[in-house]
Image (tube, grey):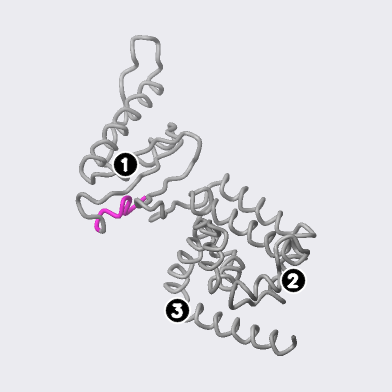
Amino acid sequence: MEGFLYRDGIDRGARVRIHVVQLSKLAVMKFAPVVFGSARKSASAEPGGLSDERGAYASRSILFCKQLRTVQKFFSCTVDLLPARSSINVTNEQGDVLMDSKPTYEQAQLHLTIFEQRREARLREARDWFFKNYHPESMEESMRIAAPMTENGNKVMMVFSYWDQACAFLNHGLLNEDLFFETTGEFFGVWERVAPIVEEGRKMFVNPLFLGNLEKAAKRFETWIEKRAPGHVAAMRAWTKQLRGAAKSAA
């Protein structure tokens, strides 16, 4: 938890949201001393019959919440206590995760579930067709290749909907960013295929949110990968351009 809240990188008055979750004994004992300084190690049992251990836990919990409010006041940020999750995220006003903790067991399980769905026979067939045949440069060309309610159109929408949903889980903090980006790159390839025509498609169907989660995740991935593998995106785009040229020549 060193560097929690990006202490050196957040100006006073900045708007961030801190998700502090599963406020358990473990969370209080692990996070409070590191983030806010050492908490009291012991407390007297309350008159109602609480043991010393439970009394200490209650004291730590109260102290932790008070210190969270202090951070909220100093940074002008929003502090959310969410008991349903077990990770700590810092997000900006747009909802982008600025800092993500290590993957939790629940995040890993969801990650594996999403991967298992990708192996479904029809989706596997659709993904294979998509990358071999879908290279539109305009909505007109897309409608010719994979018009809605056709077999090819259904394949394209299956690929779109699968990856947009997976990216929605990522954007809402249900998946760990590093784990997702380290093991999943196909979604970025899908976005690169549709990016040239997506605005035209959004206008045609009057839906500015169409593939919004895919776009948001792709932009995050581009920033993430360029820090770790400079030039990767440029090389991938050059390779995609070659595939598009080969596909058009074959047609």
Q: Sort mark 2 into few (<14), some (14-19) or many (20+) by Cα contacts within 10 Å.
A: some
Q: Residue at x 50, y 35 (%)?
A: 84
Nearest the eye: 62 or 98: 98
Q: CA distance from mark 1 to mark 2?
A: 45 Å
With 104 as the anchor, is 54 left or right in this view? left
User: Image quadrant of residue 32?
Assistant: top left
Look at label 2 and name its amino acid. Trp
All told, the count of numbered labels is 3
Q: Sort mark 3 into few (<14), some (14-19) or many (20+) by Cα contacts within 10 Å.
A: few
Look at label 3 and name its amino acid. Pro
Q: CA distance from mark 3 to mark 1?
A: 34 Å
- Which sits earlier in the primary sequence, circle 2 or circle 3? 2
Foreground disc of the pair 3, 1: 1
Q: CA distance from mark 2 to mark 3?
A: 30 Å
Residue 78: assigned label: 1
The kind of secondary structure element at disc 1 is strand
27 magenta-colored: no
| SS majority, magenta | loop
With 237 as the anchor, is 18 left or right in this view? left
Tell me residue 199's x, y (percent). 51, 67
Tell me residue 46's x, y (percent). 34, 14
Residue wearing tag 2: 129
The stretch in magenta equals: 1-8
Q: Residue at x 74, y 88 (%)?
A: 250
Q: Quadrant of the C terminus?
A: bottom right
